[in-house]
Amino acid sequence: MLNHGQYSTLRQTIQNRATRLGYFDGEFTTRRLEVNPEQHTADISLVFRSGVRYRLGEVSFKEGHGFEEQLLEQFVRFEPGEIYHADKVARLSGDLSNSGYFSGVDIDASPGKAEEGVIPVSVDLTTRPPRSVAAGVGFSTDVGPRFSGNWREHWINPMGHRRGAQTELSVPRQNVGAWYELPLDPPMTDSIRLSAGYQREDIEDVESELLTLGQQWKHQLDNGWLQVASIRWEGERFRIGDDDPEQSSLLLPGLGYSKLQADSPLDPSRGYRIQFDVTGSHRAVISDVDILHANVLVKGLYTLADNHRFLSRFQFGGVATNRFSDVPPSLRFFAGGDQTVRGYGYETLSPRNSEDVAIGGRYLMVGSVEYQYEFTENWRVAAFVDEGNAVDDLSDPLATGAGLGIRWISPVGPLRLDVAKGLDPEFGGEWRIHFSMGPEL
């Protein structure tokens, strides 16, 4: 059956595809539709002459942006003379917009300005205000009400350096930190960050004060993995239960890799996250104890028939040391709560001492499966099972929790309310309500 609308759409699709690929002089030399009413047939004849494919020329930045040309040139991922593709221009626009330096990006790559098939690219940038301040109030059942504040200077010199400070305050945890960041090449993904922070915690009879000074080098590999090489010093003063206060000093070089694949940043329908990192210390280098600390996290999400979502999560961590009693709480493992095993109190799953105080384990093993059904737009019900524990021996028993929940997809991401039952009373399992927010991956 002849459909004139589909015929017109076909012609327009061919024309649009040619334009997107840089065949700006392309045209139909033959465009014929012959209808035979007696035979009930229609013959279509389309001949498209593409012409010469245009190329991208030099990229120039209009004056007034306030940044070094060398920094801006590092955002350009194509070389002069490369064949034109609209996606290359769009990626340049997106990279500049997402850099945090600009409030407006206007790119002119009009074929009308081409010379001998080469299109000059002109970029007009509007610099954003240099500083921003944000404050927020949140709540989770792990730490209760919390206040957060953030101050950021998005650029402080023509080289694109940045700096900032942040704080988060809740009853069991208070922290404050500051950082200074230098962009590398390419600045979209690579940077060096210097940081300092202080954190105080009082959770389940474990008190800790932690001071950190460190440096991170972020580099995105060609295969999409993010590599983070770091070195940090941690000075921690802590007390577990009624024990005497102790102190530790550790110099911790580390290396981590992560990859996130998702079809949406706030509420993806499918994707995965893989993350693993390793850090260590040695008594020969400004450290009180030998430590090798490793952690692996894998998350997956798949949606079937639009409304049926399946989520899974697995986490494993371990610490090898010559003297576990000298490992500070910040490097031990605890489980229980919104992000690990629901149905148990926050960080209550752990080996305990003779006074029944959770002291942290050598290993962490956590797994979770969850099913969600979207019964109306932006609302889902969920059913889940979590299992895991922080243990000193990999053969130690795990705690299991199961429950039901509801999800609301708000403009800032999913909000989760769960009712969970801890199925192992010997580990403190009971009915608990869990509230949390943030992306599934």
Image (cartoon, helix red, strand yellow):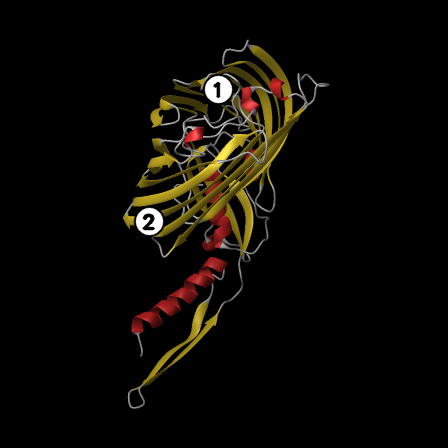
The mark tally for this picture is 2
Q: Nearer the viewer, residue 261 or 281?
A: 281
According to the picture, the residue beneath numbered tag 1 turns out to be 356
Q: Earlier in the sequence, mark 2 or mark 1?
A: 1
Q: Position of residue 170 (x, y in %)?
A: 39, 19
Identify the image quadrant of the N terminus.
bottom left
Q: Is residue 156 visible?
A: yes
The residue lying at 35 percent from left, 47 percent from top is: 372
View extreme (bottom): residue: 38
In the rendered image, the vertical position of residue 42 relative to residue 360, given as above or below: below
Residue 59 falls in image quadrant: top right
Is 144 displayed left or right of 325 in the figure? left
The residue lying at 66 percent from left, 19 percent from top is: 289
Tell me the number on the disc at residue 244. none
Q: Position of residue 439 (x, y in %)?
A: 41, 39
Q: Residues within 10 Å of mark 2 (few under 14, many from 20)?
A: some
Residue 222 falls in image quadrant: top right
* Three-letter amino acid code at the position of disc 2: Tyr
Q: Position of residue 361 (x, y in %)?
A: 55, 27
The residue lying at 36 percent from left, 27 percent from top is: 141
View extreme (right): residue: 284
According to the picture, the residue beneath numbered tag 2 turns out to be 373
